């Protein structure tokens, strides 16, 4: 079973601060995805990374896939209250479409 | 282009009743995935279906749970004789193809078993 560990589990910060959260595994993934989920809604895809060492930017969000394709990080610059939500990472081991999800990181950004 | 649709959004059942959860994939998508999300846990894969075929049901409980994706109509996740432990949010996702294709999630069905 491939497990994805996300850390920290909970994070509460002030608006304007920067933060980095992590998604780690002992297994290699062909691709890794980050989702954001708001209460009462389904996960919304933020980014997919497929190449070891890849860095993708989405406005104030920067995603990095580890060189060994076992881990990923999400960095948010100048966090805003609208960034509040549950951030999930999910990995696909290969051509098999079954996604393995981490438990998520609950982020709260205070105004 | 409408997204993945799920209904009902909320479902309350008493122990022993049946629950039917429906999922209409995005237009042009023929691959459907069902996931379950329990409090304090991540999303857990249940089953992967393509039109009229179950491709991977390795995450489905052995009893009481079944899924189908008929040629016409939505995909159905059926839970017979529900128990309190079945209370969870059930999400459906769809994709155009398999492999590394992006999965788009619906808003989920919150099942509460009394």
Image (spheres, coloured by chain):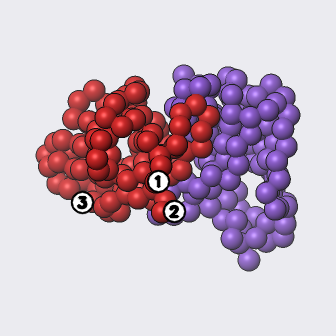
Chain colours: A purple, B red
- Secondary structure beneath dot 2 equals loop
The residue wearing badge 1 is B26
Front one among B77 and B49: B49
- Secondary structure beneath dot 3 equals strand
Q: Quadrant of the C terminus of chain A?
A: bottom right
Work out whether mark 2 precedes mark 3 in sequence or the reverse, and give the earlier one.
2
Work out whether mark 2 precedes mark 1 in sequence or the reverse, and give the earlier one.
2
Q: Are marks 2 and 1 on the same chain?
A: yes
Decide if residue A103 is in sight here.
Answer: no
Q: Quadrant of the N terminus of chain A?
A: top right
Kindly identify the residue that appears in the image at 50 percent across and 52 percent down: B105
Kindly identify the residue that appears in the image at 56 percent across and 62 percent down: A38
**CB under 8 Å between discs 2 and 1:** yes
Q: Position of residue B92 (x, y in %)?
A: 42, 48
Query: In this rendering, which labeled residue sits more in front, label 1 or label 3?
Result: 1
Name the subunit of mark 3: B
Q: Is residue A9 above or below residue A29?
A: below
Front one among A43 and B26: B26
The residue wearing badge 2 is B1
Query: In this rendering, which labeled residue sits more in front, label 2 or label 3?
Result: 2
The residue wearing badge 3 is B12
**CB under 8 Å between discs 1 and 3:** no
Kindly identify the residue that appears in the image at 36 percent across and 52 percent down: B23
Q: Position of residue A2 (x, y in %)?
A: 59, 25
Work out whether mark 1 precedes mark 3 in sequence or the reverse, and give the earlier one.
3
Decide if residue B69 is in sight here.
Answer: yes
Determine the CA span between mark 2 and mark 1: 8 Å
Name the subunit of mark 2: B
Q: Is residue B21 above or below residue B49?
A: below
Determine the CA span between mark 1 and mark 3: 26 Å
């Amino acid at each position: 079973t491939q497990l994805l560990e996300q850390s920290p589990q909970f994070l509460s910060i002030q608006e304007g601060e920067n933060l980095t959260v992590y998604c780690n595994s002992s297994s290699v993934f062909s691709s890794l995805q980050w989702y954001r989920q708001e209460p009462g809604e389904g996960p919304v895809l933020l980014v997919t990374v497929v190449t070891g060492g890849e860095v993708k930017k989405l406005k104030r969000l920067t995603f990095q896939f580890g060189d060994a394709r076992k881990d990923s990080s999400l960095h948010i610059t100048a966090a805003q209250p609208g960034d509040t939500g549950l951030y999930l990472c999910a990995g696909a081991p290969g051509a098999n479409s079954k996604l393995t999800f981490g438990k998520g990181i609950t982020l709260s950004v205070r105004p | 282009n409408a997204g993945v649709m799920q209904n009902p959004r909320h479902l309350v059942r008493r122990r022993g009743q049946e629950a039917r959860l429906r999922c209409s994939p995005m237009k042009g998508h023929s691959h459907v995935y069902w996931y379950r999300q329990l409090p304090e846990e991540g999303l857990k894969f249940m089953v992967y279906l393509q039109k009229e075929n179950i491709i991977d049901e390795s995450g489905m409980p052995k009893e009481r749970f079944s899924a189908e994706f008929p040629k016409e109509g939505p995909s159905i996740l059926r839970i017979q004789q529900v128990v309190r432990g079945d209370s969870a949010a059930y999400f459906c996702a769809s994709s155009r193809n398999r492999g590394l294709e992006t999965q788009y999630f619906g808003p989920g069905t919150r099942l509460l078993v009394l």
